[in-house]
Image: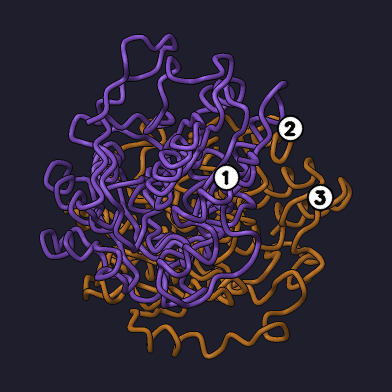
Amino acid sequence: MEKAPVQQKETRPLKNYVTLNPNRQKASRASFGEALVRVGEENPDVVVLDADLSVSTKSALFAKKFPGRFFQMGIAESNMIGTAAGLALSGKVPFLCSFGCFVAGRFETIRISIAYNQVNCRIIGTHAGIGIGEDGYTQMALEDLACMRSLAGMGVLQPADDIETQKMIEFLSHHHKGPVYVRLTRQNLPQIFNESYVFEYGKGVIVHERPMASVPTADKKDISIFATGGVVYHCIEAAQKLEKEGLSCTVVNIHTLKPLDEKLVIDLAQTHKWVVTAEDHNIIGGLGSAVCETLAEVSPHAPVLRIGIEDVYGESGTGEDLYDKYGLSTPKIYERLAKYVQL
Amino acid sequence: MTTSHTNELIEKLTNIARELRILSLQMICEAQSGHPGGSLSAADLIATLFFHTLAHDPKNPHWPDRDRFVLSKGHGVPVLYAALAKAGYFPESELMTLRKINSRLQGHPDHVRLPFMETSSGSLGQGLSIAQGMALAAKLDKKNTQIYCMMGDGETQEGQVWEAAMSAPKFQLDNLVCILDYNKGQIDGHTKDIMTLEPLKEKWQAFNWDVQVIHGHDFHEILKAFDQTQMKRKKPHMILAHTIKGKGVSFMEDNIEWHGKGPSPTERDKAIEELRNA
């Protein structure tokens, strides 16, 4: 377990909530499925809808435990979205589940039935990004964040590991008002957080930072990396490697892309020489865009490098091979950053 | 439920429907935009729902045991606003703010600005799914309420309608009543020329709905059809109501030009005179 050193001057949360463990891995869709059963027990208003992908989205666990509160909608996502809106308009808290690309593809139905109505629907989009691997582009959500971010009042969330997913789903079941989109991975994610972690909607979470006292040039640190979802762990690993080369890095897990923690983004962009964003999504419209939109309005700020899918379609392959090919693996992120800062 | 209705009731509904038509035309004229054709075609159905059939309480709009009405054909909202105001949900004077800046009366239904509108709508094809969700919630909560949804006929060209058509019978939603305002017109022309809909009765029957075909301007038939929906056969109800676009105003009837434009004050006055003298 890492601990923030006492000599640190800045007011930063202690990172005692971080426990990196590459040997403990779970896909965030699996964490979601387990959390859903638990919140289903706690909140009788929770209902779940799926469009013939419950085995993949893991909502099948809820369906087995609470068949009366699970609605199998068949391969008809628009109807699922509208039905969920109607349930929410009648006081229920629906979790509607499909692959991210298939729900985001029914944008117009989400726009009116859910977003404009401002109802308590939790839209669950699994199979985020190229990380899904072999199925190829048609099943990859690479534009979903861009779509969802453009809807006024829509919360846009993406957890980075098992514990964060579980705590996020608990929050969405018990506390949050209004529509949200939650983006989950097919692939396993290594553990980043321990049980002491507290999920705070709209807050960026520092998951790695080099103590100021050990930074050679005291005025500014080097790289601030904002990452989301499946690439957060890779960014931590890349940062650790860069620090061996003498650079100081801060890694922030952005679990809430909207509303973005603008204060933290601006703060770090002014205390670091470079800003980097990383996401398994098109660099247009996702986290990279959100960070740039925020920083464009303030001066001075560090330049921003956006790592992600560079406005191309995905393809088939193993998730690992694709992460390497499209620059999202630990070594590729490290190389990109080293080149960017001309190490 | 009785299946014969008194002449007094029919006279009352006739008068209310006339007033709703007049108010709709006044609002649309004042706004100089809006949809007269589809407001007038739905007036008799809306009058019957809000002044006889629906269990609702304008003084307690969020009454949990109320019946719900979803206007899926959102462009027909002037006649719904007129009915809501007349029923006492808000002052009739507010009707003339339709479509104007800062008004709660948006050009299409807005649930957030007017929470007693059960849902926002106007992007066609979405209302039946929403009504289905409400019907599922009512079943879960073991409420003995009905959910009504009104669609336009052109609207059923949307694919999502048929997704809902497929799913509501699966969930045995006999508390769901869909009313098709079958006025035969849409923006670009007559529905038969734009995209063939028929045979509608057979289509909905094939999807396993309880289907009734009625004249949507005949109160005896409307009342009887709504009474029939109290029969619970584990099937959702579809009422195919043959109507006339622009009903009640000779120069608007079945005239596609009047789908979506505001009448001039002269046209409005002429129309109102006709309606009053009918």
Quadrant into which the N terminus of chain B falls: bottom left
Q: Are marks 3 and 1 on the same chain?
A: no
The purple-tinted chain is A
Residue B164 visible to the viewer = no
Q: Chain of mark 1?
A: A
Which tag is nearer the camera, tag 3 or tag 1? 1
Q: Secondary structure at mark 2?
A: loop
Residue A189 at x, y percent in the picture: 31, 54
Q: Chain of mark 2?
A: B
Q: Is residue A198 above or below residue A143?
A: above
Residue B225 at x, y percent in the picture: 38, 70
The orange-tinted chain is B
Which residue position is annotated with label 1?
Answer: A337
Q: Secondary structure at mark 1?
A: helix
Q: In the rendered structure, which amino acid carries the disc numbered 3?
A: Arg
Which residue position is annotated with label 3?
Answer: B268
Residue A146 tag number: none
Q: In the rendered structure, which amino acid carries the disc numbered 1?
A: Leu
- Evaluate if marks 3 and 2 touch, with contact meaning CB atoms under 8 Å apart: no
Q: Secondary structure at mark 3?
A: helix
Residue A256 at x, y percent in the picture: 44, 38
Residue B101 tag number: 2
